Image (cartoon, helix red, strand yellow):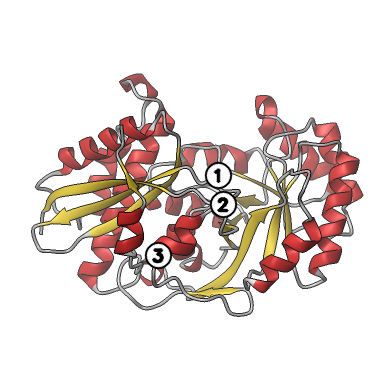
Amino acid sequence: MKIAGCETHAVRVTYEGSVSGLHVVLRLRTDAGIDGVSYVSRVSPQTIKPLVLLIEGNVGQLSGADPLNAEALYARLFRSVNPLLGAPAGLEARAASAVEAALWDIRGKALGQPLWRLWGGYRSSLPMIAIGGYYDENADLAAEVAELKELGLAGLKLKVGGLEPEQDAARARLAREAGGAGFVLAADANQGWTPEQAVRFARLVDDCDLVWFEEPCRWTNDRRAMRDVRFATGTRICAGQSEYSAAGCRDLMVEGAIDVCNFDASWSGGPTEWRRVASMALAFDVKMAHHEEPQVASHLLASIPHGTFVECFHPDRDPIWWNLISNRPRLVDGLLELAGAPGLGWELDADFLEAHRVTAA
């Protein structure tokens, strides 16, 4: 079996309240008739054309290679994730991630195994939470929590860090009250606060049973700052989505900055790099999460013993996950159940894809 080429499709879906932006769907072809399918989410109009060109260039470099040679192909892809070569490392990493996910889809299909099993098979289901609670003067946080529960979701990762700690603590308390004791609640400050502010927030919500406090401190000194917040409050700290490599996540762990690592396989080179981080995390007693991207995150997190929650957005913020994947399983008691279909196992709705296809110009 050899890599024979690819097709790329840009997709734009605009819903009321949607911030989903553009997506790129990749179909990676082989001469054996087995296709690998992946997609890259939330691409800006300014970067979609260069991203498509990078994806197609990566596939061209692998043309004729055996897709089952996982480590050899990943080594070739990861060499491109270098800002000294021209394109920004982040864009190169996203292109490599799309190709690597499609390669793994091919391998799973060729071997007749779902990726959650091929990567370890620890379990076939895990809880799914939504990222939400965005700042909106018309937002009703209690109503949002009720709607998430109605959708079958297990919890909420609440946006904080844009207000004073006391104001955001009041919002977290409202979410906890609306969700109830069994509702999973995390907080994500998106690097919004100083260490002192983050400590104030953590102490104010100490009895809200947060599963983690994500990226609490500003990026300029975040490893030491997160370590200090973690040690001062005992709050579980989560970070890793802003790293492009296993080496960056290693440094977070060595520094004692995190309890949970939410490295992103779709931003950082692909599933192989994520699995390397997961192996290190197990040795450091750090749990694994994944920043968004449920289509690949679900398989990765289910495959290991220290995986946590799959993340998604409300349908208005990620219409792709809720509409493009035609065989997306229903949530039952907050759990996403992965099927035994080989590879990633997702079937794309061809009509939906065609209706929302745009030119990557």
Label 2 secondary element:
loop
Separation of marks 1 and 2 at Cα, in angstroms: 5 Å
Left or right: residue 111 versus residue 19 is left
Q: Position of residue 82 (x, y in %)?
A: 36, 27
**Label located before the other in sequence (1 or 3):** 1
Q: Are marks 1 and 2 in contact (CB under 8 Å)?
A: yes
Q: Quadrant of the N terminus?
A: bottom left
Q: Dot 3 corresponds to which residue? A: 325
The 10 Å Cα crowd at callout 1, few under 14, some 14 to 19, many 20 or more, is: some
Quadrant for residue 116, please give it.
Answer: bottom left
User: Mark 1 highlights which residue?
Assistant: 19
What amino acid type is highlighted by mark number 3? Ile
Q: Amino acid at mark 2?
A: Arg
Residue at (84% x, 51% y) in the render: 171
Left or right: 63 as drawn, with respect to 338:
left
Marks 2 and 3 sit apart, C-alpha to C-alpha, by 15 Å
Residue 231: x and y in percent read: 80, 43
Residue 317: numbered disc:
2
Location of residue 59 (image quadrant):
top left
Q: Earlier in the sequence, mark 2 or mark 3?
A: 2
| Rendering coords of residue 119 (x, y %) | 38, 65
Residue 199 seen by the camera: yes
